[in-house]
Image: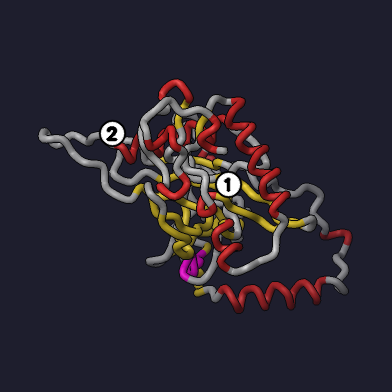
Amino acid sequence: MLYDRSHGTSTQVFGDDATPFEYPRIRKIVVQEGLNTMVGMGGTKRNLVVWLVSAFELIEKVKLQQSVFLSYQDNPRLARTIDEADTILHSRRETRAHTSIPAKLKMRYAVLRPLGSGGFGDVFKVVDVDSGALMALKILKQPVAGTEDGQRQDNSPDQNALKREVKALKRINHPHIVNFISSQGWGSPRVEIFMGLKEGTLQTLVTGQAGFSVDSLFHQMLQALDCLAFYNIVHRDVKPENILYVTRPCGYQFQLGDFGLCNRIVSARSCVGSELYTAPEVSRGRLQTHQVDI
């Protein structure tokens, strides 16, 4: 992470791969290969001194400096008595009374690699440019269809599915259900959902013949489905590809994900889901309860 703690906010990044500091965000951004590799500081344009950053070389230099500083002792007379907080607003120019602050800042990210493709979107591994956090990003596959008068159509099946997914995940905080971070782009052709990044899916574990406790898997998924039942939510697409995992010291922690087909019991009647895992009442168009997920 690159922090700008100067009093005059005199540091900035430049170039084609730059995601500059942005008010009123905390002045820190990710620096890595292909992202914010040209850094400048000083002068009215913050480019009095400019240099290119190699992420690998930067990491090696930091390690070297850390080893040197272990044996270095500061002069106590020159020690700083007050540290600047990361959230301090450094310049009067950025703190004027008439400067408006957005209610919600747009999530800024850089795509690292694709993770997969689901029925309602493509999933990517991304990094939050402003925090350095790694996340999973789902992007709606197809553009939102426009109407004859050129107005954007916001009630397409894919849009509605993603809205259901976000609405469900926002309400739930459970160790065995994938964690929702944020969403943006509603009403536009590109809807984005940010979720916690996991290591893989149950399908990849099975394909790779990795050893895991089936009893533990079932126990964790039953806890997740019990939580959904409490909120009157039917998932309707429980399958190995939609069960994610992370490795813990005590074993695998499984989490249920991909809520694009979920619905409330009172309205769950449509025939959806993967055919191999579909319950009879789903294929027959009957009222669906939590039993379809079991």
Residue 50 within the magenta-colored segment of the rendering? no
Q: Residue furthest top?
A: 266
Relative to residue 215, is residue 76 depicted above or below? below
Give the quadrant of residue 286. Answer: top left
Name the side, left or right, on which 203 lies relative to 44. Answer: right
Which residues fall within the magenta stretch? 34-40
State the image coordinates of residue 130 (x, y, percent, origin top left): 54, 52
Q: Which residue is mark 2?
A: 154
Q: Is residue 225 visible?
A: yes
Give 77 or 159, whichever is nearer the viewer: 159
Give 54 or 193, whichever is nearer the viewer: 193
Disc 2 marks which amino acid?
Answer: Asp
Circle 1 residues within 10 Å: few <14, some 14–19, many ≥20: some
Name the side, left or right, on which 109 lies relative to 270. Answer: right
Name the side, left or right, on which 184 lies relative to 58. Answer: left
Q: Which residue is mark 1?
A: 26
Disc 1 marks which amino acid?
Answer: Ile
State the image coordinates of residue 233 (x, y, percent, origin top left): 52, 29
Relative to residue 217, is residue 74 depicted above or below? below
Indicate which label's residue lies in the foreground, 1 or 2: 2
For marks 1 and 2, the one nearer the N-term is: 1
Give 55 or 22, whichever is nearer the viewer: 55
